[in-house]
Image (tube, grey):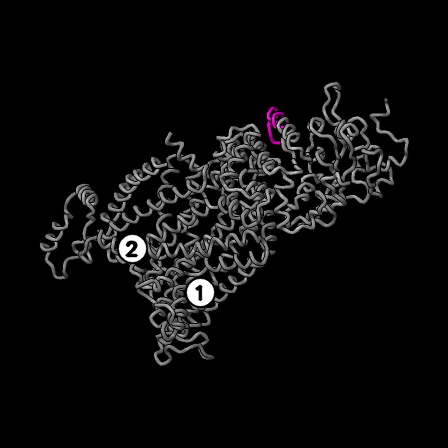
C-alpha cells in the first residue's frame, strides 16, 4: 500500500446546473503505484477529465461539486487540503498536461517566462536562475533554448505541447497526469511527442496517469490500464491482462470497434447504442442496455469491482458464473 | 409551370413568417422571466399612461405654464407635492406633463432615425462597393461628431425649435442604425435562402424587404430600445444648454436649466426632473438589455 | 516599432488636410455673410464692402483656402470674429484645462471601473455581480449634467467641502472629474466585465492554476493582461471624446475648457474660431489614437509582431 502514489476511493463528482445534475463520476476507484504508467481509457463523456481535475482539486466550482470520496496522493488526502497546501502541491508534487496545446499557453507571456513561473512558484531561486532552468527544460524537450524569448503564437502545435510538457516537468513532480496529450496533434507529430514523453517518464522516474481514448497509445506507453465507463472503473489490470485476457464486455466492444488490418473487408463493429445520459443514469449497470451479455439482474444492480487475479479486476455480474467467457475467447 | 412557381412562392413566405412568430413567442417567454426587464416595462407603461392622462388632467395654460408669483419657490408640501419653481408653477404638474415631450421626442426621433438609418445601412450592405464606401464614410464622420455639436450647428443655422431638435437627434440615431443594418444585411445576404429567393425570380426590393430585413430584426429592436434612452438624455442635455425645446415648455432638461439659478436655496427644483429622466432611461435600458438577452440567450452565457 | 510610429504620425497629415478642407468648406460656404454680422447696425453698403475686402471674403474659395493653409503651417489660424483674439492662442489657453479635466475624469473612471468590472466578472451571477451591474446601469442612465448638479448640491451647498464652480486648484477639479468620470466608468465597467468573462473561460487560466499559482496571480497576471485590449479600446474612445471637450460638465461647473469654447463659437457663428478649434481637436484625437495603438503593442505581443513585421 505504501507503494501507491495515488489512491482514489469512491470518488463521486457532480456538475450541478440549472438544467439538472450531471453525474460525471460515480464511485470511482483507482490505484497507481510509484513510477508506473496507468492508462485511463474511455469514451468522451466517461468522466476521465473530471477525475483528473479532481486529483488536483481543480474541478470548476460552480458548477462542479465533489460529493464523496478520498484522493490519497503520496499519503495525504487531497480533498482535505487547504487552498495554500493545494497551491504548493500543484505543479510541484503533481503536474497536469491538458489536451489542447493551442489554448493552454498564455499568449502574452514568453514561453521561457511561463516555464520559469512554475519554478519560481515552488522554489526559492532568483528570476535569472529560474529562467536559466527554463531554458534547460526547453532543451530537454527538444527545443533550442534561444526560443525561450518567443511567444506561444510563434510555435506550431507540436512544439507548444512540448512547452506544456516542459512546464509540467519543471519541478520534477512525482505524478504526471496527461489528459489526451496527443489527441489534438497531427499523426506524425503524435508519434514524436509520445516518444519524447516516454523518454522523459523514464528519465524523471515519474508515475503517470495517461488519459486517452486511443488504445494504440495505451499499448505503446502504459504498464497498467483502467477502463472507465459512465464515471466508474469497469475493468483494471496490467496491459497484458486487458489486451490479451479482456474481461469486461465494454472493453471487448472497444477492441472490436477498432479497425483491424487483418480483418480487412469486414464491417466495423461499433458498440450499439450510446452512453447513458449522465443526468439520468440507470439504476443498475450503466452498460447493461448496450451489453450483449446482459441479464435482468444487470438492470437492477450496479456491480462492484471484484478481484479476478492479483492484478486484474472487473465490475461485471456475468463473472458470478465462473464459466463465463467473452465471445472473443469462446472460439478459442 | 406557373402553378409550380406559385406554390413554391407561397411556401417560402410562411417559412420566414412562421420562424419569426414562434421565435417571437419564445423571446417573449424569456423576457417575462427577467425581473429587471419587466420592472422597466411596467414603469414605461405607467409613464405612457401618465403622458396621456396629463393632457386631460392638467390645463396647459393654467397648470403648466401659468405664472403665479405669489406661490413662488415653495418647498414640497401637501399642496404642491414637488414644490413650486421661481415662477410659482407647480413642479409636480410640470414634471408629469413633461413626460409627453420626452416620450414623443424620444420615440419620434428614434423612429425616423431608424427608418433612415436602416435604409442607408441596408443599401450599403446590400450593394457593397462604391455605395458602401460612400455611405459608410459619411456615416463614420457623423458618428464621430458628438450629438451636441451637431445640434449646435443645426440650431445656429436654422434657429431653436422642436423640429430642429428632432432633426439633430435623428442624425445621431440614424448613424447607429446604419452600422447595425449594414452589418446584419452583409451577413444575411450571403446565406443560401437569399440565393434561393433570387432563383425564384423575386425582384431585388422584395428580396430585401421580405427576406433579408425580417432576419435582421433582433439587433435593430435592441438598438431601438436603447436608442430611445440615449435620445431622451441627449434631448434633455440640449434643452439644458438652451438649444433644445424652447421655454416655457416643461421639458425636463429645460426645467433643470432654469432651476439651476436657484439651486442655492431651492435645491429641490433640480432634483425631481433629473430623477424623472434617470428612471425613464433606466427603465428603457433594463428593457433593452432584457430584450437583447431574450432574443439571443447565447450571448449571456 | 519606431518606424511604425513615425509612419502613423506622418499619416496624420493627410487626415488633417482633408478634415481641414471639409470643415473650412462647410463653415465658409454655409451660413450668412460674416461681414454683415460684424458691421455695426447702421453701416452703409460701402462700409460693409470694406470689411469684406479686409477679411478677404471676395477672393475665390480656393485662394482663401490656400491662404488659410499657409497660415496654419505658421501656427496662424486666423482671428476670432467675436473676440478679435488669435484663434490658436485662445485654443491653447483653454486646452490645458480640458486636458486636466479629461485626464482626471478618465483616471477616476478607470479607478472605479476596472476593479468593479473584474469583481463582477469573477462573481458572475451572484448578488455581487447584480449589485455591480445595477450600479453601472444607473451610471449609464443618469444625465451627467444632472449628476453634476446633485454633486454640487451635496458637496458644495450642503457640506461646503468643495467649490461649486470655476477652476482654481485641485479641489475645484474633483466634482467636475467625478461628474464626467462616473458616466465613463459605467461604460468601462461593462467592457471590463465582458472582456474578463471571456478571458476567465480560457484554457491558459486553468494551466496557471494547475501550476500552483494562487487565485490573485491567476486573475491579474494571466487574466487581466489578456483582457486589456478591448478595455484599452474603450478607454481610448472615451479619452478622445473627453479631450475634445465635455460641454455639459464645463457648463455646470463654469470650467474654462475647449468644449464650451467650440459650443459658444458655433452659436455665435464665429467661423475662424470654429474651424480652427475643430481642426486642432482632430489633431488631438489623432494623437490619442496613435497613443492607443502604442499601448496595444505594449500589451499584446501578437499585435506588436504585426507592427514590427510591417517594417520588414
Q: Is residue A189 left or right of residue B49?
A: right
Chain assignment, label 2 = C
Q: Is residue B168 left or right of residue A186?
A: left
Q: Is residue C39 left or right of residue C233?
A: left
| Label 1 sits on residue | B99
Whole-percent x and y of residue B68? Answer: 36, 78
The quadrant of the image that shows the N terminus of chain A is top right
| Label 2 sits on residue | C96
Viewer-closest of A38 and B291: A38
Mark 2 closeness class: few <14, some 14–19, many ≥20 residues within 10 Å: some
Residues behind callouts 2 and 1 on a single chain: no
Viewer-closest of A8 and B198: A8
Whole-percent x and y of residue C196? Answer: 52, 48
**Residue C15 appears in the picture as rendered:** yes
| Prevailing secondary structure class for the magenta stretch in the rendered image | helix
Question: Residue B268's quadrant in the figure?
Answer: bottom left
Amino acid at each position: 500500500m505504501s507503494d501507491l502514489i495515488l489512491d482514489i476511493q469512491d470518488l463521486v463528482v457532480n456538475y450541478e446546473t440549472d438544467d439538472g445534475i450531471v453525474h460525471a463520476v460515480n464511485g470511482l476507484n483507482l490505484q497507481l503505484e510509484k513510477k508506473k504508467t496507468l492508462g485511463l481509457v474511455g469514451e468522451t463523456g466517461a468522466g476521465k477529465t473530471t477525475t483528473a481535475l479532481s486529483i488536483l482539486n481543480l474541478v470548476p466550482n460552480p458548477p462542479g461539486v465533489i460529493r464523496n470520496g478520498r484522493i490519497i496522493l503520496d499519503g495525504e488526502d487531497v480533498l482535505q487540503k487547504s487552498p495554500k497546501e493545494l497551491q504548493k502541491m500543484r505543479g510541484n508534487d503533481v503536474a497536469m498536461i491538458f489536451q489542447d496545446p493551442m489554448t493552454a499557453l498564455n499568449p502574452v507571456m514568453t514561453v521561457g517566462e511561463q516555464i520559469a513561473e512554475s519554478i519560481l512558484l515552488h522554489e526559492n531561486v532568483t528570476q535569472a536562475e529560474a529562467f536559466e532552468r527554463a531554458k534547460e527544460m526547453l532543451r530537454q524537450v527538444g527545443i533550442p533554448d534561444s526560443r525561450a524569448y518567443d511567444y506561444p503564437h510563434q510555435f506550431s502545435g507540436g512544439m507548444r505541447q512540448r512547452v506544456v510538457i516542459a512546464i509540467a516537468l519543471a519541478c520534477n513532480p512525482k505524478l504526471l497526469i496527461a489528459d489526451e496529450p496527443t489527441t489534438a496533434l497531427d499523426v506524425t507529430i503524435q508519434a514524436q511527442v509520445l516518444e519524447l514523453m516516454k523518454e522523459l517518464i523514464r528519465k524523471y522516474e515519474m508515475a503517470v496517469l495517461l488519459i486517452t481514448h486511443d488504445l494504440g497509445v495505451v499499448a505503446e506507453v502504459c504498464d497498467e490500464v483502467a477502463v472507465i465507463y459512465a464515471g466508474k472503473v469497469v475493468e483494471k489490470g496490467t496491459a497484458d491482462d486487458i489486451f490479451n485476457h479482456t474481461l469486461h464486455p465494454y472493453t471487448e466492444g472497444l477492441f472490436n470497434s477498432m479497425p483491424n488490418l487483418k480483418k480487412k473487408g469486414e464491417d466495423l463493429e461499433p458498440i450499439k447504442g450510446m452512453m447513458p445520459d449522465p443526468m439520468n443514469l440507470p439504476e443498475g449497470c450503466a452498460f447493461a442496455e448496450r451489453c450483449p451479455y446482459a441479464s435482468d439482474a444487470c438492470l437492477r444492480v450496479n456491480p462492484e469491482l471484484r478481484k479476478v487475479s492479483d492484478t486484474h479486476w472487473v465490475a461485471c455480474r456475468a463473472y458470478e458464473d465462473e464459466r463465463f467467457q467473452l465471445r472473443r475467447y469462446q472460439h478459442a | 409551370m406557373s402553378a409550380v412557381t406559385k406554390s413554391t412562392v407561397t411556401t417560402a413566405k410562411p417559412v420566414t413568417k412562421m420562424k419569426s412568430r414562434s421565435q417571437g413567442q419564445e423571446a417573449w417567454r424569456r423576457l417575462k422571466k427577467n425581473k429587471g426587464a419587466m420592472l422597466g416595462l411596467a414603469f414605461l407603461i405607467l409613464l405612457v399612461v401618465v403622458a396621456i392622462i396629463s393632457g386631460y388632467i392638467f390645463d396647459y395654460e393654467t397648470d403648466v405654464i401659468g405664472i403665479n408669483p405669489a406661490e413662488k419657490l415653495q418647498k414640497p408640501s401637501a399642496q404642491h407635492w414637488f414644490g413650486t419653481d421661481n415662477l410659482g408653477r407647480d413642479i409636480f404638474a410640470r414634471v408629469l406633463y413633461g413626460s409627453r415631450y420626452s416620450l414623443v421626442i424620444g420615440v419620434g426621433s428614434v423612429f425616423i432615425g431608424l427608418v433612415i438609418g436602416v435604409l442607408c445601412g441596408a443599401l450599403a450592405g446590400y450593394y457593397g462597393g462604391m455605395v458602401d464606401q460612400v455611405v459608410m464614410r459619411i456615416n463614420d464622420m457623423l458618428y464621430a461628431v458628438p450629438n451636441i455639436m451637431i445640434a449646435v450647428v443645426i440650431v445656429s443655422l436654422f434657429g431653436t425649435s422642436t423640429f430642429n431638435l428632432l432633426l439633430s437627434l435623428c442624425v445621431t440615431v440614424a448613424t447607429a442604425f446604419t452600422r447595425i443594418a449594414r452589418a446584419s444585411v452583409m451577413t444575411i445576404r450571403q446565406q443560401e435562402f437569399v440565393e434561393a429567393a433570387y432563383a425564384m425570380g423575386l425582384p431585388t426590393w422584395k428580396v430585401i424587404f421580405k427576406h433579408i430585413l425580417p432576419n435582421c430584426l433582433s439587433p435593430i429592436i435592441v438598438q431601438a430600445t436603447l436608442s430611445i434612452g440615449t435620445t431622451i438624455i441627449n434631448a434633455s442635455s440640449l434643452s439644458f444648454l438652451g438649444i433644445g425645446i424652447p421655454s416655457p415648455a416643461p421639458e425636463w432638461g429645460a426645467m433643470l436649466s432654469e432651476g439651476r439659478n436657484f439651486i442655492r436655496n431651492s435645491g429641490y427644483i433640480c432634483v425631481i426632473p433629473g430623477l424623472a429622466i434617470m428612471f425613464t432611461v433606466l427603465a428603457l435600458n433594463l428593457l433593452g438589455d432584457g430584450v437583447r438577452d431574450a432574443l439571443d440567450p447565447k450571448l449571456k452565457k | 516599432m519606431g518606424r511604425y510610429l513615425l509612419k502613423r504620425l506622418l499619416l496624420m497629415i493627410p487626415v488633417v488636410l482633408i478634415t481641414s478642407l471639409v470643415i473650412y468648406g462647410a463653415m465658409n460656404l454655409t451660413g450668412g455673410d460674416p461681414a454683415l454680422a460684424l458691421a455695426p447696425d447702421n453701416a452703409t453698403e460701402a462700409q460693409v464692402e470694406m470689411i469684406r475686402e479686409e477679411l478677404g471674403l471676395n477672393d475665390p474659395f480656393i485662394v482663401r483656402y490656400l491662404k488659410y493653409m499657409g497660415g496654419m503651417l505658421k501656427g496662424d489660424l486666423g482671428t476670432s470674429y467675436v473676440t478679435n483674439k488669435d484663434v490658436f492662442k485662445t485654443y491653447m489657453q483653454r486646452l490645458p484645462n480640458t486636458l486636466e479635466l479629461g485626464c482626471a475624469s478618465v483616471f477616476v473612471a478607470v479607478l472605479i471601473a476596472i476593479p468593479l468590472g473584474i469583481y463582477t466578472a469573477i462573481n458572475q451571477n451572484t448578488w455581487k455581480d447584480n449589485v455591480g451591474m445595477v450600479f453601472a446601469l444607473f451610471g449609464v442612465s443618469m444625465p451627467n449634467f444632472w449628476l453634476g448638479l446633485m454633486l454640487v448640491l451635496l458637496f458644495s451647498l450642503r457640506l461646503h467641502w468643495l467649490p461649486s464652480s470655476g477652476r482654481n486648484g485641485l479641489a475645484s477639479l474633483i466634482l467636475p472629474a467625478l461628474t464626467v468620470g462616473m458616466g465613463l466608468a459605467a461604460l468601462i465597467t461593462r467592457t471590463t466585465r465582458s472582456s474578463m468573462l471571456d478571458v476567465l473561460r480560457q484554457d491558459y487560466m486553468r494551466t496557471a492554476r494547475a501550476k500552483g499559482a494562487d487565485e490573485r496571480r491567476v486573475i491579474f497576471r494571466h487574466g487581466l493582461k489578456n483582457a486589456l485590449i478591448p478595455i484599452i479600446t474603450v478607454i481610448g474612445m472615451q479619452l478622445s471624446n473627453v479631450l475634445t471637450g465635455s460641454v455639459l460638465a464645463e457648463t455646470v461647473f463654469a470650467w474654462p475648457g475647449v468644449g464650451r469654447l467650440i459650443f459658444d463659437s458655433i452659436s455665435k457663428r464665429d467661423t475662424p474660431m470654429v474651424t480652427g478649434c475643430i481642426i486642432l481637436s482632430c489633431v488631438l484625437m489623432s494623437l490619442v489614437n496613435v497613443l492607443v495603438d502604442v499601448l496595444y503593442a505594449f500589451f499584446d505581443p501578437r499585435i506588436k509582431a504585426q507592427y514590427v513585421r510591417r517594417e520588414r
